[in-house]
Image: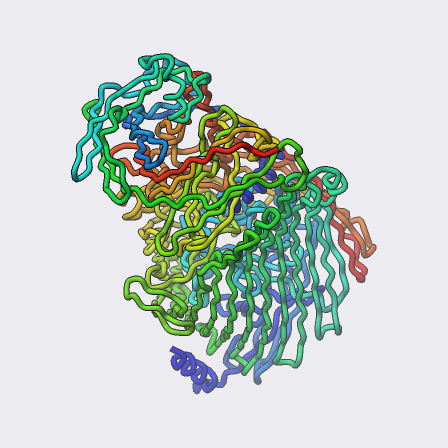
Amino acid sequence: MRTLHFLLILIGLIAVLLTSCEEEYIPITNTDLQKIVVEAYIEKSEEGIPPYVILTKSLPFYTDFGLNILDQLFIHDAKVFINTNNQKVELQEICLNEVPAELRESLAKRFGLNLDSVSVNFCVYVDIQGLLQISEGIEYRLNVYADNDSVMSTGVIPPLVPIDSIWFEDVPGKPLDSFLQLFCKIVDRPVEKDYYRYFTAGEGEALIPNFSSVTDDYFFNGQSFKFILQKASAPGEDFNETTGYFRKGDSIEIKWCVIDKSQFDFWNTLEVSRTRQGPFSSYVRIDGNISNGLGIFGVQNCKYYKMVVPN
Amino acid sequence: MYRIFLLLFFFSLLYTSHAQKKYTINGYITEKSTGESLVGANLYLKKNPTVGAISNNYGFYSITLSEGYYEFVFSYTGYNNVEFSLELNADTTIHVKLNQGILMDEIVITSDELKKNVESNEMGTIDLDVESIKRLPALLGEIDALKALQLLPGVSSATEGTAGLYVRGGGPDQNLVLLDEAVVYNTGHLLGFFSVFNSDAIRNTKLIKGSMPAEYGSRISSVIDVQMKEGNDENYSIEGGIGLISSRITAQGPVQKNKSSFIVSARRTYALDLAQPFINQTSYAGTNYYFYDLNTKINFRISEKDRLYLSGYFGRDVFKFNSGDRAFSVELPYGNATSTLRWNRIIKENLFANVSFIYNDYNFQLKGGQEEFQVRLNSGVKDFSFKTDFDFYPNPTHHVKYGLRHTYHQLTPNIVNATNGEVDFVSNLKKKYAHEAEIYVSDDWKFNSGLSLNYGIRLSAFVFMGPYFSSSRNINFSKGQVVKTYFVPEPRIVFNKKLDANSSLKGGFTIASQYLHLVSNSGSTLPTDIWVPSTEVVKPQIGLQYALGYFKNIFNDHIETSVEVYFKDLRNQIDYRESYVEMFSAEVENEFVYGKGRAYGIEFFLRKKKGRLNGWIGYTLSKTERWYDGIENGRVYPAVFDRPHDLVIVGSYQINKNWQLSSNFIYATGRAYTPIQSLFIINGRPNVEYGPRNSSRLDDYHRLDLSITYDNRANHKKQFYSSWVFSIYNIYNRKNPFFLYTDLNSNILTGNAKARAVKVSIFTLIPSIVWNFYWDNTKRELR
């Protein structure tokens, strides 16, 4: 239903842009208020991705993010722990440049990166040894100590609600011979409130989320429900007639996750914040779950689906 | 509550003075050429101008005097006086018809009209007649009553070019907007760029921004009382205009001369209609946008004592978007429909009654989807109201008003129906129902020649009914069950102490309550904003306003001036919680936070009504603040519409009988907004971390508008004449920031990402041209 607000903004913008002019400016930001930014995930899935934490600092507003700025982005030498009632695991920092070349591509892809397009020395804290036991229903507590500061968060992995069936159909409207639209069906749990997020990857691409990647089960609670999975667009990619569709013959991948409420709130507010702009919109403060910091500690139960788009 | 009302009614019915024999003269004051009622017209004794009366909202006057000989004067702004003498020895009914003043010569302002600034008990009240509004330069040539009100001190707009109003620090839902006594819930077309009021159908617009009289309630900030014309009961006429954005036409005339009349007025946009042949050649065939307004009214003089009126307003915005390539379509129809059936009766010579039945329907819909995926959303408000008002004139020193109103509200939250072709979904959110009732009594009392009071009280009650689930009491209330009742007494008092013949000191205190709320999550009100009732969770808003002013006329009453200070204490204010995003799954009241507000300021006003050159200067120095426990731990922050400095200069100069020049200059402190504090990276992309709410300001706002009007009315004996209005909005092309946006759509990790922050200005220098025409079946003299 963000579409409704988006459409109203579209009407207003049509009226506005007929007689408008733009002027770039640089917001004055306060560098003294720098915060620790956490992007952390614990994922239960058959892929066996280890828990990881990306630690960065918040930035002043720059118009050009060159390497000299981005090299200062990552927080190094932090102490990062994930605890449960039975375990306390410290995560180790690894950076892309330190990883043997033959492993870099697979590692990059695991974190949703296309190695060819990554220029920075991407660093992440990982449970390298796979010590942390990953189960549904267990509370995980994240604690980070860095730069004389600390942040923390908690999360419980929800049960998996897998995709029940998945198939392709012709695109709606104007026929596109080389593309198909992807549908899936799930059977939602009747009592509990469920939250979902999905990622898509085209041929040779990394898994990335769409601009509207999360939903709750309000419209289909406890029901078998069919909906469309749109192919995600990379940042900066223009909208065109094939946006959202999959090319015939491509090997694609879908990552389907059940997430908790705090992660749903985070992505929901973040995605609306990106799209809600204009004279009739007020700001949306992104609702993270990092105490004393910014970002997300996301616990999720995921399943991966690989398939070839039929010809 | 109703027993008090009955007591007042029977008292006024039975009241007779037992002093020296007294008799009443009463009647209607109307415009001679059209039969339109004149509201607020003056009647006074020529030899003792302090004794008099004012016509009420329906043009009725009444004055009770001792038996004797009197010379009466009837006057009204822009009209020639009527005088007559009478030996008053019986109750007498005299209907008075006033002629409009001569167009070219000095506008006829009688001295008593000019003294109204000093002598009336009204504070913060301004009447804007349609002719004054039509003289103002207008954006794209579209004359707009609500935008004209924005040129007054203490009134500001939400955003550039929009018709939403913020009055003395109050929110847009805190203004009671009435059209012929019907509440108008959504006052804007095209997201507020144009108001719903067609100026050709409007007779008068009154703004009360302080010291609201007891007959008004349900909102805590201001009253905007718009009255429709009644229709010319003497002659037929057709008038209209063709502009760049819309065109309008109005037809009026007698059904039976001097007995009944009608008026029908319509307006419609057509910009995208003209482009349809081109749009239909593209994959967006069927995409269109337009809005229309239709005002209708008919009235009957059933007898000397009885008049009946039936009026209606129907307005709609229709947006259709169609993408053939994607088989995607959406429609957004929304609008108001109001209907008022009104009966005026002169019960006895000094007792006048108005009885109204009002129906009101504001509805917003969204329909759309792609192939089997379809969504339908509905929201709105439906009211059924009954009201009755009495004007009782026991003697020349008292004018007692009393009345009651009862409204049955039906509010529809965002109710969603959706389907994916296999599963149908219906939202479990339920409509909300409530009864709202008020009685009031007030007295306008001329204590002596130097002191007068307007004092009164309004008692309001609100009953919220089921269906409703109370999570605090864990009770499911079925339809019709009482969930919560509120009762608020609202005293009102204004005093006027005359200091000398040309100056006075006025002060007032008002308590007002509000039971329906429009909580907006945008920078301006949108049709998607929903009205919610007070429930057991949502408390009524309460507003206390204190005002004190010094009013003085100078240069032989040619210039009226005033300085007014005010303080508003706003309680139970409502806003959305931080990080709120519309989710149609949630009961919206669970997303609210509650707090308080205050607004205070000083308004300086200088106005010249007489002469070739007239206009006004208004300056307001003010502050408007809010604070909520659930937002930044109760930090006090400026409201988005806080404008510490607000200066408006409006001028109009009649060059000769055909040409008139008008100009506005506006200066205001930049709007408060929530700034970007930093960026942070998630998923390789920068995102915005916002700083404290409303802690920054946009650049100050200022612009100059100019218009020149050529009117050939004075050249023509014929029944048809026209005028051309050429205007330039923002003549020196000031780039006032309208909104800010950021473009952060890049991947940081590529090493060459870009981010942009942009200020957008709209309505830079905009010329426009409008052609207006008028025809009637009378002959006129050359002027």
Residue B64 spot, x, y in % from top left: 51, 78
- A227 relative to B635 in the view: left or right: right
* Residue A150 in view (yes/no): no
Does B607 sit above or below residue B46? above
The foreground one among B710 and A188 is A188
Does B24 sit above or below residue B455? below
* Residue B451 in view (yes/no): yes
Residue A300 spot, x, y in % from top left: 34, 39
- A51 relative to B666 in the view: left or right: left
- Identify the residue shown where x is 47% and y is 55%: B530
Residue B342: which quarter of the image? Answer: bottom right
- B117 relative to B290 in the view: left or right: left
Residue B181 spot, x, y in % from top left: 54, 66
Q: How is the image coloured?
A: rainbow
Does B431 sit above or below residue A220? below
- The residue furthest right is B718
